[in-house]
Image (spheres, rainbow, N blue to C red):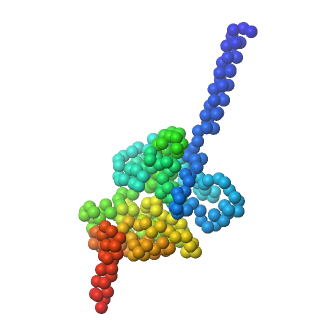
Amino acid sequence: MLPEDKEADSLRGNISVKAVKKEVEKKLRCLLADLPLPPELPGGDDLSKSPEEKKTATQLHSKRRPKICGPRYGEIKEKDIDWGKRCVDKFDIIGIIGEGTYGQVYKARDKDTGEMVALKKVRLDNEKEGFPITAIREIKILRQLTHQSIINMKEIVTDKEDALDFKKDKGAFYLVFEYMDHDLMGLLESGLVHFNENHIKSFMRQLMEGLDYCHKKNFLHRDIKCSNILLNNRGQIKLADFGLARLYSSEESRPYTNKVITLWYRPPELLLGEERYTPAIDVWSCGCILGELFTKKPIFQANQELAQLELIRHEENEVSDKQI
């Protein structure tokens, strides 16, 4: 064999080996959409399935865990974006606009579309099982809610080009939301704006329409407060932060946790320890917000549950005396 032939055979062999390695690496690269959910926490509320889905799952005896990303069967992908495939580098970070439950929230611009978005960081540094359970709840529920008065979650992006292994390579993910200019608490505390009765009526109408939609979808929000109500410069209201939300069934006998809703917006039944509550708990919180829009401050401000109950009782007695 001529030296030229040997060299050609060697070159072909190297190319073949590289091609095989490349194919193996391609298969091993795991997309976020293929990663499993962490196990449910003991005693936690199971939001993953509706009663109909649970029945179907029991019949099929399926062993597979649900995926958190990628559209479900029959859903239309927004702008053909596959959740988890894009990296946060696809966005220009403009600045920090707040602090979320699991990390900072950034204002950013999508490099591809020029659209302004909010990036909610989900850090995994201290999470033994991967995604925080509250983040999983928020993702699952928001993907089932489409309403003009509920915040729109557009996609999930990673902090690196390749999706991360939840347990081995700790990093961060970002929930991508539509951008809103303000939250209601910040505006009220600033003292720079004045809401007249028409503003308040518009805000409350939008809030109650969004909440009514949630309740008709059988979801309780369980954390309605001014900091979770976002609005833009056009006066549009969006209900946000569904980390404590859960599926609700009037026929379910299992008790729910009563350690929900920020104290100042918590209804009497939860303060008294009720564990089988209804959508009325969210309506009470909305009533507290209505009062706050007029007074510019929370109407029931206590630092303990008993003191909170006493404030509510005292206000109720004052109203009764005035009516008499």
* Residue 51, percent from left and from top: 61, 67
Q: Quadrant of residue 93?
A: top left
- Nearer to us in this view, 83 or 169: 169
Residue 21 appearing in the image: yes
Classify the position of the C terminus by image quarter. Answer: bottom left
Whether 183 is drawn above or below 17: the answer is below
Whether 294 is drawn above or below 159: the answer is below
How many numbered marks have been drawn onto this rendered protein structure? 0
Q: In which quarter of the image is residue 250?
A: bottom right
**Which residue occupies the extreme bottom position in the image?**
324
Q: Which residue is drawn at 69% across and 8% down?
A: 3
Residue 279 appearing in the image: no
* Residue 85, percent from left and from top: 54, 44
Q: Which residue is drawn at 52% across and 62% down?
A: 43
Classify the position of the N terminus by image quarter. Answer: top right
* Residue 223, percent from left and from top: 42, 65
- Nearer to us in this view, 240 or 236: 240
Q: Residue at x 57, y 72 (%)?
A: 252
